[in-house]
Every structure is written in C-alpha cells, then in structure tokens.
Amino acid sequence: MANGLFISFEGIDGAGKSTHIAGLAQAFQAQGRVVTLTREPGGTPLAEQLRALVLNEPMDALTEALLMFAARREHLLQKIEPALARGEVVLCDRFTDATFAYQGGGRGFGLDVLSKLEHWVQHTSAPTSEEAADRIRNPDLTLWFDLAPELAAQRLSGARVPDKFESQSVDFFRKVAAGYAARMAGAPQRFARIDAAQERHKVWQQITAAIVRRGYLAIMVASNSGPA
C-alpha cells in the first residue's frame, strides 16, 4: 500500500486555490491513488457545525481560535488520520497555517497561544521513536496561493454574500498575507509558493511542478488548466 500523502491548499479567498483542488485530485486518481477531498474548518458533521459558528457569529478572538482547533481535532481524528493510515492522498482546503494567518496575523492573536494549541491538538499518537515523540501532524506539502488582497477583492466582488472573514478590510487581508509569509519562512521545506496572480493555466503549471518536483506524481499532468 502506498504511503499516505497530506497536501493543504492555503491562501486568502479569491486566490483561486479551490479551483485547482479537483484538478489535482484527478491527477492523483489517474495514477491509481485514492483521494480524500476535505476542508477546514469542517470536514466532519461536527466540524461543519463549528464552521458555521466561526464564519457567521461574532465572538472573542480566543473563542474563535479555540473553535478552530476543536474542529481541527475532530477533523484529524475522524477523517484525516484514518485516510492517511489507508494510504490515501488527502487534499485539504486550508489547515493550521490558515489559523496562524487569520487569527494570528489578521486578528493579532498571540502566536504563542496558537503554537500551544497546535501542539496539543495535532500531536500524533503512538510515536515509534523518541525522535517522533514530539511530532505534530502537518501537511507533507502546503501550496500557498499568494495574491494581493486588492486583486482578491476584485475577483470576489459580487460573487456571493461574504461571510464575516470575507467582509474584512483590505488591511486585514494584508495582515493575513503577512501571516502566511511568516509561516512559510518558518517551514520553507514544507511550502510551495504559488503566484496566484498568473493566468489559470500558469497557476496549474506551478502546482504540478511543485508536486512532480517532490516525487508525488510520476509525470507532469497533461492538463494545463486544472479541473474541467
């Protein structure tokens, strides 16, 4: 059985990340892999209920962060870890980097508290060695769709009724983008920055190049535009 593979898609709304998740799923399936598509916050019935609260209800910044990690714990235990144990490819629309970017960067919430929550919630069970004893579950690869907030706002204009995050100011999203940049600086080996301002087919080329370079796909995918 192939090893499980965990890939997250990160970026502000309007960056286009969701457009390419289905295309990447198809690419892995074409090479015989089983793919689990999921998202955060959400991914399980309970986590989806928490998502609705986080995206729509006003609340204290700590409450918001705690609900994010509560949903993540449920998501990990019920969906992500079982899929990885089965050798599947997990493609997740956002993960913990989003919490550091939105709650940490955008809201200005303390990164030390978020780091503690990250270790508590994402600690993997039954480590096989002392070296793995402090390991936390993070993606094998994070694709960060980097896009100027002003351009993201133009793309989203009139697309749908915004939730409480999407309705934030451009300055808020500048802070979110800085939060993502800080996460990438802290774990450069895990991240691949995608220039999301490019045309769709060029964004797709960046994605497939990052996947092939790490040996996750055997060959370059024929499609040049992501999902049909």
Image (cartoon, grey):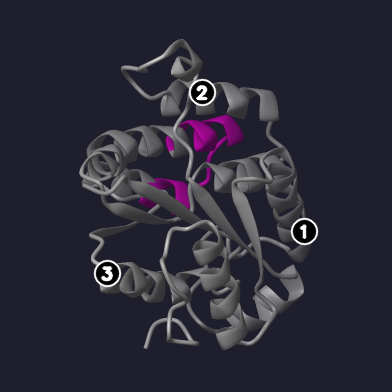
Residue bearing the label numbered 1: 174
Residue 119, disc: 2
The chief SS type of the magenta part is helix
In the image, residue 107 above or below residue 207: above
Task: Say what amino acid the circle numbered 2 marks.
Answer: His
Is 163 magenta? The answer is no
**Label 3 crowding class (10 Å Cα cut-off): few <14, some 14-19, many 20+?**
few
Task: Say what amino acid the circle numbered 1 marks.
Answer: Arg
Residue bearing the label numbered 3: 29
Query: At which x and y percent is residue 122?
Result: 43, 29
Is 64 magenta? The answer is yes
Instruction: Tell me how far mark 2 sits from mark 1, CA to CA.
Output: 27 Å
Query: At which x and y percent is residue 170?
Result: 75, 65
Residue closest to the eye, 69 or 25? 25
Question: In the figure, residue 85 lies in which quadrant?
Answer: top left
Q: In which quadrant of the rendered image does the C terminus lie? A: bottom left
Q: Secondary structure at mark 1?
A: helix
Contact between marks 2 and 1 (CB within 8 A): the answer is: no
